[in-house]
């Protein structure tokens, strides 16, 4: 279920008149396929709602989903499905939301752009975690990947001159390569709940050297690289026991399980499936090393969650990830796809518990520079500037 605000400290009210904000995103946090973009939506715009702004969210639905819910101050509308949302959203808006007089529209360009500039009257602020480009073909079937790629192609023409938000400098650089004007995009990093994600009070970790992958089990996440590195460690350093815990679910799980069996790692790898927030916290706190080896992320929020829990990350030296891990300070970066380098980095940390703890302490200090409250305030400031520039405030 979507978490509510009960138990949180009161959120200060905004100064100035409340904004009427429409947020467009493929999914909401309650969607079974939700991920980092949906966490960002809920944490950022939920805070704006609690500051007194009117926030309406239009997302896709799924089998059995309610068409309307209220969560944490957000008024959530669901229309269409996973593959029909881009067609259903404009129709739903015209029928049910166009009379609301929104001051600003935030369109999350997350897999399924809906080109809101063509069918809404308010100024549109594009929000970009990362665009897939040709990497879509690594994950989806050819028809779906081709559709994703084709939908992204006109984005520079539609939003190239827009005032927008990128969640990392890597994302803004990528937008410039694609033809956007990067000066129009402000970098507002993801935040983290620093009161919820904290180090293990007693400083204890699992007795056995342990790795953690926590996230969706999708092909593009590169989890198989972790398995290949683990197999190499076992082959060349059989006396160094290592356990890998994989927490999450997704349509790539069956393939990963087959790989585990082929590599002879069944006694070393544990698939945990979906984990509760309590179990997630324990995994981040007690694991020796968190690993994320995808080729491209908007930010890599799991890296910061691990860091806040005092656990270093070994990650691909890839866009987004190189900003959420400081190489040699809060973890290690390795060339993406280089299994030998990944295995070497993991072996060096797993064989040196004191270094794990040193990196973990620095990782916590690094994570303390990010908070959802700060991200939400910066988002509010940007939206007010956009509304003022349009003559609406």
Image: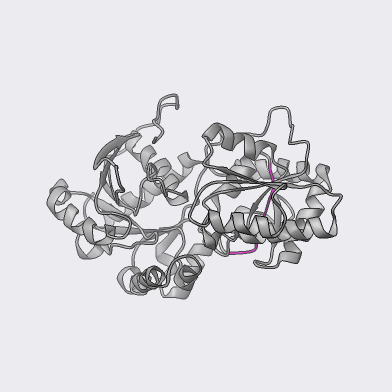
Position of the N terminus, as image quadrant, is top left
Asked whether, in this view, residue 65 is left or right of residue 335, the answer is left
Total number of numbered discs in the rendering: 0
Asked if residue 182 lies left or right of residue 81, the reply is: right
Relative to 119, say whether 287 is above or below.
Answer: above
User: Which x, y percent locates residue 3?
Assistant: 41, 33
> In front: 340, or 371?
340
Q: Is residue 268 visible?
A: yes
> Residue at coordinates 53% horizontally, 61% vertically from top-left?
219
Residue located farthest toward the top when viewing the structure as drawn: 7
Tell me the colour scheme of the image.
Answer: one colour
In the image, residue 5 lies in the stretch drawn in magenta: no
Q: Position of residue 29 (x, y in %)?
A: 39, 43
Magenta span? 311-318
131, 122: nearer the viewer: 131
Residue at image position (49%, 52%) is 250
Which corner quadrant of the image does residue 263 belong to? bottom right
Considering depth in this image, is 335 or 170 the residue closer to the camera? Answer: 335
Q: Which residue sits at x=51%, y=69%?
A: 138
Name above or below for residue 65 compared with residue 177: above
Residue 323 seen in this snapshot? no
Residue 345: horizontal and vertical position, in percent?
Answer: 76, 57
Q: What residue is drawn where x is 71% and y is 53%?
A: 265
Does the magenta segment cover residue 315? yes
Relative side of 210 to 385, left or right: right
Residue 140 lies, in percent from the top left, at 44, 66
């Amino acid at each position: 279920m979507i978490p509510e605000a009960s138990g949180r400290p009161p959120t200060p009210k905004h100064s100035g008149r409340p904004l009427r904000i429409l947020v467009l995103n493929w999914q909401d946090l309650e969607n079974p396929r939700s991920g980092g973009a949906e966490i960002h939506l809920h944490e950022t715009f939920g805070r704006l709602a609690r500051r007194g702004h009117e926030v309406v969210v239009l997302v896709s639905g799924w089998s059995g989903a309610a068409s309307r819910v209220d969560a944490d101050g957000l008024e959530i509308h669901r229309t269409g499905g996973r593959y029909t949302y881009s067609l259903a959203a404009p129709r739903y808006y015209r029928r049910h939301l166009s009379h609301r007089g929104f001051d600003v529209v935030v369109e999350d360009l997350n897999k399924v752009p809906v080109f809101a500039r063509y069918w809404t009257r308010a100024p549109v602020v594009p929000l970009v975690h990362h665009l897939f480009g040709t990497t879509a073909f690594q994950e989806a079937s050819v028809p779906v990947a081709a559709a994703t790629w084709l939908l992204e192609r006109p984005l520079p023409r539609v939003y190239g001159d827009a005032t927008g938000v990128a969640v990392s400098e890597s994302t803004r650089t990528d937008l410039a390569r694609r033809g956007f004007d990067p000066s129009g995009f402000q970098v507002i990093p993801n935040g983290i709940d620093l009161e919820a994600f904290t180090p293990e009070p007693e400083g204890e970790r699992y007795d056995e050297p342990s790795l953690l992958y926590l996230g969706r089990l999708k092909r593009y996440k590169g989890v198989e690289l972790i398995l290949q590195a683990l197999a190499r460690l076992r082959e060349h350093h059989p006396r160094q026991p290592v356990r890998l815990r994989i927490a999450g679910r997704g349509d790539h799980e069956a393939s990963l399980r087959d790989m585990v069996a082929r590599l002879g790692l069944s006694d070393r790898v544990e698939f945990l499936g979906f984990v509760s927030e309590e179990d997630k916290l324990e995994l981040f706190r007690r694991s020796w090393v968190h690993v994320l080896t995808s080729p491209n992320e908007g930010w890599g929020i799991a890296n910061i969650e691990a860091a806040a829990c005092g656990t270093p990350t070994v990650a691909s030296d890839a866009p987004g990830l190189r900003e959420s891990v400081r190489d040699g300070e809060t973890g290690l970066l390795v060339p993406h796809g280089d299994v030998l380098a990944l295995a070497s980095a993991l072996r060096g940390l797993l064989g040196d518990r004191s270094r794990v703890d040193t990196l973990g302490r620095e990782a916590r200090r690094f994570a303390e520079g990010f908070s959802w409250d700060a991200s939400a305030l910066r988002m509010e400031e940007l939206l007010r500037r956009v509304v003022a520039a349009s003559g609406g405030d």
